[in-house]
Amino acid sequence: MQLQEAQERFIQSWGTLGSHWGINRTMAQVHALLLISPEPLAAQQIMDALKISSGNANMNIRALIDWGLVFKELKPGERKEFFVAEKDMWEVIRRIVIQRKKKELEPIIKVLNEVSEVEGNSPEAEEFVHVVQNIRLFAQKADSTLEGLVKSDQKWFVGTFLNMIK
Amino acid sequence: MQLQEAQERFIQSWGTLGSHWGINRTMAQVHALLLISPEPLAAQQIMDALKISSGNANMNIRALIDWGLVFKELKPGERKEFFVAEKDMWEVIRRIVIQRKKKELEPIIKVLNEVSEVEGNSPEAEEFVHVVQNIRLFAQKADSTLEGLVKSDQKWFVGTFLNMIK
DNA sequence: TTGTATTTTCAAAACCTTTTGAAAGTAGTA
DNA sequence: TACTACTTTCAAAAGGTTTTGAAAATACAA
């Protein structure tokens, strides 16, 4: 396969994957482009490569920086900003886990804690409490699991985690 | 907190969570409603409770059945169909993992395998292969991890998995 | 300071997904 | 068979998100 075709396929697929993971399509494509670029890229190069507008490029680059997946790099003598991707996949995963844990898991745990204080002992109330407690247990497990994952290093993941499962 | 308020809050939150997880808002709300219902519900009851149209209810109930998260139940003497949710949270998670693994992880692994056959030895090609190999490693780990999770039982998750991470 | 390259903003447009609800289809009952 | 309760379909509408691009802002250089 030719390099250019491979690059395009990779960028497209990464975009599709991202859009299932709370990262918008373009944001994931920008990330993919930077991932496979040996050199930092300027906004204009990103716009050209992905055929997107300046507004779009700017917004998604900013978002990637917020997520900690992309860094700004200034070259001496150049006025414009260049961007590089976080290329350590383990770090990429950690960054995404941190964001999603904060935006999704923590809010639902908060709600589960609140609604489990429900009054009454009708069948509806009993069923409700039962289901909520159950989910709460899982949510808390997931929370500590992810917390552990965020704090652990790649060695652990590649070694123990996989071997254990099999 | 009153039961009704708690139920509404739970349904709303479950809907929001679902929408971040490839399950559309209404689909997750229907699932939440069935989860906390001690009795099977008919389509009409779901439509009334969530204030949604028949088409919407029908489509999302079907989707939940496809995912294996909801089952049809026929009551003797009743013409209409009733629906119950899968209430075992472990099974719920397994079902979702199965669907998403098939729809997201497997396709990207396929693409990664294909594009890693790239030709050339320019810096671009080298960087490309390097990044792709790296992601491929993670994707394959994730695949076997999830495969293991799908095959394992809850006891394992609650016991070993959590303790191990800490 | 002025000029110019670059970045940022944001309202409007384009795009994509979800929902509606009327009509058609289905199946049990008489 | 015809009736009725219920389910399914699907084109159109609504709703939500993303993208565009012109204009404004910024920041360096002369």
Image: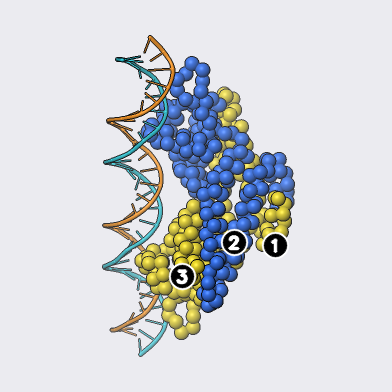
Chain colours: A yellow, B blue, C orange, D cyan
Which comes sooner in the sequence, label 3 or label 1? 3
Element type where label 2 sits in the image = helix
Label 3 in the same subunit as label 1: yes
Q: Nearer the viewer, residue B29 or B96?
A: B96
Chain letter behind tag 1: A
Query: Which quadrant is home to the N terminus of chain B?
Result: top right
Label 3 in the same subunit as label 2: no
Q: Is residue B60 above or below residue A120?
A: below
User: Whole-percent x and y of residue B15?
Assistant: 48, 41
Horizontal side of A97 relative to A29 (left or right) equals: right
Chain letter behind tag 2: B
Q: Which residue is mark 3?
A: A4
As drawn, the label of residue B136 is 2
User: Whole-percent x and y of residue A23?
Assistant: 48, 57
The CA distance from mark 3 to mark 1 is: 33 Å
Element type where label 1 sits in the image = helix
Q: Is residue B75 above or below residue B117?
A: above
Residue at x 54% of width, y 36% of height: B69
Element type where label 3 sits in the image = helix
Badge 1 crowding class, 10 Å Cα cut-off, few under 14, some 14 to 19, many 20 or more, is few
Q: Nearer the viewer, residue B100 or B48?
A: B100
* Front: mark 2 or 1: 2
Horizontal side of B153 relative to D22 (left or right) equals: right
As drawn, the label of residue A155 is 1
For residue C30, what is the image quadrant?
top left
Badge 3 crowding class, 10 Å Cα cut-off, few under 14, some 14 to 19, many 20 or more, is few
